[in-house]
Amino acid sequence: MTHHTPRFTFDNSYARELDGFYVPWEGDKVPEPRILLLNTELAEELALDPEALDSDEGAAILAGARAPEGAETLAQAYAGHQFGGFSPQLGDGRAILMGELIDSQGRRRDLHLKGSGRTPFSRGGDGKAVLGPVLREFVIGEAMHALGIPTTRALSAVTTGETIWRETAKPGAVLARVAASHLRVGTFQYFAARGERDRVRQLAEYAIARHDPELAGRDDRYLAFLRAVIRRQAALIAQWMHVGFVHGVMNTDNMTISGETIDYGPCAFIDTFDAKAVFSSIDHGGRYAYGNQPVIAQWNLARLAETLVPLLHDDEKEAIRLATEELEEFPEVYSAHWLAGARAKIGLTEGDDSDIGFVNALYAAMAGQTVDHTLFFRALPQAAEGEDAPVIELFDDATAIREWLPHWRSRLAAEGRDPATLRAAMDAVNPLYIPRNHKVEEALRAAEAEGDMGPITRLLEVLGAPYEERDGLEDYARPAPGSFGPYKTFCGT
Ligand code: AMP
Ligand code: MG
């Protein structure tokens, strides 16, 4: 423990430029803030001193109980479609933006606290977060980052010393989260729904300056901005699909303008490949099922487009036509990203759009089987050399995959791939270690029930290098044992 004061060099553009888009607000005082996890690598990236943060004062700051010098803490306003129904007023009901930091690469990053107490946006909620979901967001977000997927990141998890009542008594906790910004589709919706056209314009200008500065000043900047968001989301969702990530609650308030994954609540990774996979206990209709995510992303982007219509053209009809044209690009842009990713997963470097049938045949072979999505792609390189058994063994009925493999081998032969470079290339894009649901639960239970941070620390280490096979980690690569049963997740409140 050191005693120098943690210093933050804030530059708070949101507070400064978007008066009326938030409520200045402070976090609650809490009895006993204590740091459980501190992301020292991220702290350094943010030009923060991890040693200074790892102190009583640092804990109080990261719990939201004390504002450091330069912070302008505030609760952001936003709206959102939740499961398809519009809520005009959501907003930071249990979170505050502390301020913005310019990181070591010159990037502007939000520092945000989740679980810091009630705000004017809390509605019926208590404004608090509890330890399990905070740790879950920490682990999954960091795993996504290590997988190379754009995401918010976790700087710290602290306990507050409070007891929070959920279905039982739980330890209160606060997550410090770092994001390219917290602008959401729902931020635009909040002002659009109130008919505040000038504020939508102001927000769009701010978003452009922050995320698409090359568009600033262009006559067609609002349309180009919509296109940029559509492209970022198409690329993001394709990446989710290729690692088997199910977000679980793709409400428009949980979709960023930056293209980062945000708000890890009932999310989970698939084990067997199943387009219908749903883990969230409240997603009865399967709206946010694994295979539905691209469609939902496009639906959410249509909600963003609606908010921008008044900015796109003086003639509303023409504005709608322009927006629709952009939205209609989504499936194609998404498919191109998805196909490029799929090709990389199977070690092909050449090809064209006609590969879609070839790749779809592979996924059709996996569908309805108990084959593990992650292990399949790690076993596949062996089949390049004719050693099919490790792949075949993963299937209950191997008829379709037996048919597909020779086609694949002839494609590889046509590309003249040698087996050693093929394996390295495939392993570099197909993770071996993903946050297996049973391993995540095991680590959360140890932390929650016994205060044992060993398993979660170890899990974070494993997930920090997901593509690199290491001795002794076999247990982290295996699917859940049958005894684990079907997996259900709950919203992180
Ligand atoms: P989420 O499901 O975390 O994306 O949150 C959806 C909305 O509910 C946001 O406006 C949150 O701020 C709000 N919310 C979630 N949990 C709480 C809570 N415990 N207290 C107050 N507001 C909450
Ligand atoms: Mg949310």
Image: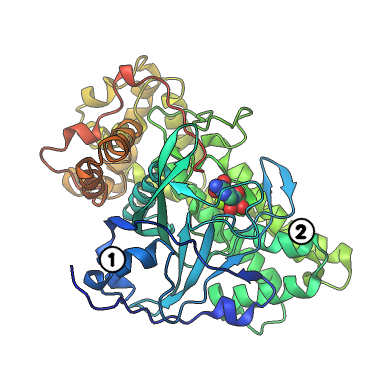
SS at circle 2: helix
Q: Quadrant of the N terminus?
A: bottom left
SS at circle 1: helix
Residue 411 against residue 277 in the figure, above or below: below
- Using the rendered view, name the quadrant where residue 396 is placed: top left
Q: Amino acid at mark 1?
A: Asp
Image label count: 2
Which numbered disc flags the more N-terminal residue, 1 or 2?
A: 1
Residue at which label 1 appears: 56
Residue at which label 2 appears: 306
Residue 29 visible in this rendered orientation of the protein: yes
Residue 301 against residue 165 in the figure, above or below: below
Could you classify mark 1 by the number of other residues whose Cα lies within 10 Å: few (under 14), some (14-19), or many (20 or more)?
Answer: some
Residue 316 against residue 81 in the figure, above or below: below
What residue lies at 44% left-to-right and 80% top-to-bottom? 10
The alpha-carbon separation of the residues under discs 1 and 2 comes to 47 Å
- Using the rendered view, name the quadrant where residue 18 is placed: bottom right
Q: Measuring from the top left, give residue 490's x and y in whole percent.
A: 50, 35
Question: Closer to us: mark 1 or mark 2?
Answer: 1
What residue lies at 74% left-to-right and 73% top-to-bottom? 199
Q: Nearer the viewer, residue 307 or 340?
A: 307
Which colour assignment does the render follow? rainbow
In the image, is 215 to the left or to the right of 195? left
Question: Please, which residue is most extreme toward the bottom here?
Answer: 217
Q: Nearer the viewer, residue 21 or 35?
A: 35
